[in-house]
Image: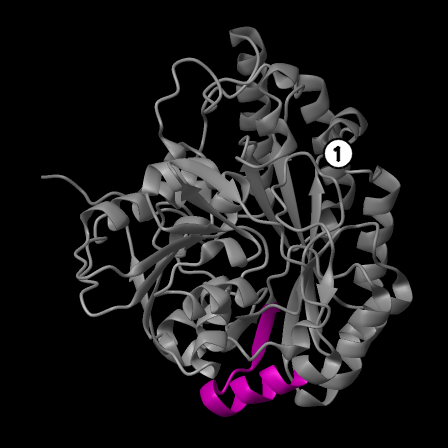
Amino acid sequence: MHVALVYPEVLDLARFKENRKEFPPFGVLYLAAVAEAAGHDVSVLKVSDDDHVRDFTGFDAVAFTIPSSATYGIIRDCRRESRYDQDPLVMVGGVHPNFYPEQTLRDIEPDVVGIGEGEQTFLRLLEHGRTRRLEEIEGICYLHNGQPVRTPPRTILKNIDALPLPARHLLPTEDLVMADRLSHTDLRMAHVMFSRGCPFPCRFCAAAQTRIQYRSGTSARHELTDMIERYGIEGFAIVDDNFIVNKNKVRDICTHISDLGLKWSALSRVDTVDAALLADMAASGCLEVKFGMESGSPRILKAMRKNITADHVHRAVRWSRAADINIKLFLIHGYPGEDLQSTAETMELLGEIAPHIDRVSLFRFVPLPGTYVYDHPEEFSLHHTSSQPGWTGDWGQYHIHHNDQHWWGTEQQFAQVQAGYEQLAAMVGELWPDRHQLPAPAPTA
C-alpha cells in the first residue's frame, strides 16, 4: 500500500509559536519503520498551521498523528481541507486521540482512531485497509451504525528491541541533527528514545502509558552507531518521559555505549538517582541531567502527587555535581493552590541550590488534556475545559509556552499567581538567561 503519515511541525510542541525545532516525531518514524519493513511504500509529511493543505490522491492509507492537544486544530484542518481520491483508509492516533478517541472520531471523521501502543495496530489496519474488517483489530475506536465502538485494548510489546530503528531517512537531515541543544555545547547531536512510559502519578502530566519499557544496551548501541555512520553525530539527547527509573536498565545502556565517545543528556526525577548511578552515567558520556523539580513548596509538591521533597532535590544536585554532570531544572508555577507563600518557598529552595545549577526552564501551569487535573475540573475550580459551559472548541489554547490564561480559581487567587510568577521569572531570568528568547520585533519606521 501507498501510505502517508502526517504530523504537525514539532516546533509547536517544544516552543509553541517560536521558530525553534526540537526532537523529530518518533511515533510517526516508528510507524513508518514497521510499515516499510512489511513492504509498504511510506511518505512522511509535515504540516503546520499556515501550511496544512495536502494532496493525498494516490494514497491507499492516510494516517494523522496528534502528539498534543495544542496541535489538534492543525490536523483537523488538514484532514478537512486536503484532497483525496477513491476511498483511502484514514487513521488518527497520538496523545490526544488516545485520551479522547470518541471525540476525535466524530470531529475529524477518520475511519478509525488508534488507542495505545501503535505499531502492531497500524500494521493490522494496513492489512485490513481494503476489507475494513475493523472489529477484528485490538486497540481501536470506530463508528458502527453511527455509534463509536472500542475494541479490546492491545497488550503492549514485551520487547521493544523487536521494533526496527525509527525511519529517520524519511526526514531531511536538518530536522534530525542539530547543534546548540546539548547543555552548553555546540556538538552535532540528535535525539533518541531508549524507553517508553512513566509509572509515576503526577497530576499535571498526561502520560499515555504507565508501564515503562526499556530497550537493551545492545539496541541502544546499534542505533547510536547507525547515527554516527549516517549523520556524524557527536552526542545525543534522550527524550524519554523519565529515562532514569530502572537503574539496572540504565547501567546496561551505559555499559554498551561507553566506548562510542558520545556526550549525552537525559531527563530524570530527583528521587530515582544515586551517586553510584550518576558516576556510571558520567563515565559513559553523560554531561547533563534534566530534573523535574517543579516546585519548592511541600504543599504544592504534595498536591501534584510528585512525591518528592527538598532533601531529594539537594541530594540529586550534590551527587550530580560530584559526578561532574551539569544540571538543568524544570519548574512549573501556578498549579492549583499556588500563592505567594508557595512561590517564596520555591524561590528559597532555588536560591539554596542556584550555584550548582546550569540551566532552568520555567513553565506556567496549564491543565493539559488527559491529565488528572483536566479530567477533574470541579476539584480544581478549573475554567475553559471542554466539559464546561462556554467551551469554544479551541484545543490550541493548551500549549505550555507563553501561556498566561486564568486557568483556575478566583480573580484574587489569579492575581497572586501572576505576582508570584513575575517574581520567580525575574529570579530565573537574572540567574539563568535563556539563550532561546523570542526574536525582537523588527523596528518600525
Q: Is residue 431 left or right of residue 13?
A: right
Q: Looking at the picture, how far across and down is residue 256, in whole percent?
A: 75, 85
**Residue 49 seen in render:** no
Q: Residue at x 75, y 34 (%)?
A: 296
Q: Is residue 353 left or right of residue 192?
A: right
Residue extending farthest to the bottom is 229
Q: Is residue 395 left or right of residue 184?
A: left
**Residue 47 seen in render:** yes
Q: Residue at x 56, y 27 (%)?
A: 421
Mark 1 Cα within 10 Å, few/some/many (few <14, many 20+)? many
Q: Residue at x 54, y 61 (%)?
A: 118
Residue nearest the viewer, comparing 370 with 100: 100
- Residue type (three-letter) at the residue carrying disc 1: Gly
Residue nearest the viewer, comparing 145 with 348: 145
Residue nearest the viewer, comparing 282 with 38: 38
Where does the magenta region start and end?
221-237
Q: Main secondary structure of the magenta part?
A: helix
Q: Looking at the picture, how far across and down is residue 358, in whole percent?
A: 65, 55
Residue 236 in magenta? yes
Residue with the mark numbered 1? 296
